[in-house]
Image: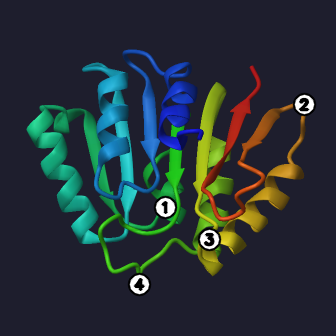
């Protein structure tokens, strides 16, 4: 079985180096934020968003323990407010849709915020940069987010972007992801 997390990291690693700028649009418990902070090194920078204070606190603690907090900016706000915080291109960005791992699952990402957030994120991807969006179709909103994102990505210019979808086709509820690369 394909491991979504390992594949994510392989895609991201090709777009990150010391000094890079990365964005975690859904920080959750901070695993992706920490990985990105390590990948960009001490001269790089990571911006990370989450609407839940528990996510911000878990992430802050994880980054502090790893000694990389100073290269990160934790933003306690919705990812659809990205343009209020970031106005420069980034090399790699990640959306891991769904809910905060370990939570009661009552707070989930929602396509009404996710679609504008992805649209704005795409506008900030640097030439040669990457945006990954992991979708979890095992619940109704996750399915709706995935369908809406698929339609939106399909309408982008193939001359400016290359967009792929990696999915296990015989397991419809399995997570999958979109990978968008801005052409140079």
In primary-sequence order, the first of circles 1 and 2 is 1
Which residue is painted at 42% across and 79% down in the image? 107
Secondary structure beneath disc 3?
Answer: helix
Q: Residues within 10 Å of mark 3 (few under 14, many from 20)?
A: many
Horizontal side of residue 84 vs 146, given as left or right = left
How far apart are the two marked residues, 4 and 3, measured between alpha carbons?
13 Å
The numbered dot on residue 142 is 3
Q: Quadrant of residue 66?
A: top left
Secondary structure beneath disc 2?
Answer: loop
In primary-sequence order, the first of circles 4 and 3 is 4
How far apart are the two marked residues, 3 and 2, measured between alpha carbons?
29 Å
Which residue is under mark 2?
Answer: 159
Pick the residue in front: 29 or 157.
Answer: 29
How far apart are the two marked residues, 1 and 3, measured between alpha carbons?
16 Å
The numbered dot on residue 79 is 1
Which residue is under mark 4?
Answer: 106
Check the image and report above or below for 177 versus 84: above
Q: In x, y percent, where is residue 169?
A: 78, 52
| Quadrant where the image shows the C terminus | top right
Which residue is painted at 19% across and 57% down in the image? 58
Tag 3–tag 2 contact (CB < 8 Å)? no
Q: Kindly report which numbered mark, 2 or 4, lies closer to the viewer in this rendering.
A: 4
Secondary structure beneath disc 1?
Answer: helix
Q: In x, y percent, where is residue 115?
A: 67, 65
Pick the residue in front: 121 or 26.
Answer: 26
Which residue is painted at 77% across and 39% down in the image? 164
Which residue is painted at 59% across and 76% down in the image? 139
In primary-sequence order, the first of circles 2 and 4 is 4
In primary-sequence order, the first of circles 4 and 1 is 1
How far apart are the two marked residues, 2 and 4, measured between alpha carbons?
40 Å
């Amino acid at each position: 079985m394909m491991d979504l997390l390992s594949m994510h990291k392989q895609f991201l690693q090709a777009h990150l180096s010391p000094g890079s700028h990365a964005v975690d649009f859904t920080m959750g418990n901070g695993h992706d934020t920490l990985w990105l902070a390590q990948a960009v090194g001490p001269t790089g920078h990571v911006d990370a968003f989450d609407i839940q204070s528990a996510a911000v606190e878990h992430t802050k603690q994880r980054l502090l323990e790893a000694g990389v907090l100073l290269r990160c900016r934790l933003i306690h706000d919705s990812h659809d407010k990205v343009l209020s915080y970031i106005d420069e291109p980034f090399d790699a960005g990640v959306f891991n849709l769904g809910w905060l791992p370990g939570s009661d699952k009552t707070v989930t990402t929602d396509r009404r915020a996710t679609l504008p957030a992805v649209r704005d994120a795409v506008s900030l991807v640097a030439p040669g940069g990457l945006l990954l969006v992991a979708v979890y179709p095992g619940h109704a909103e996750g399915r709706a987010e995935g369908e809406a994102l698929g339609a939106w990505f399909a309408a982008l210019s193939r001359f400016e972007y290359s967009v792929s979808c990696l999915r296990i086709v015989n397991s419809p509820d399995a997570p999958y992801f979109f990978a968008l690369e801005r052409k140079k």
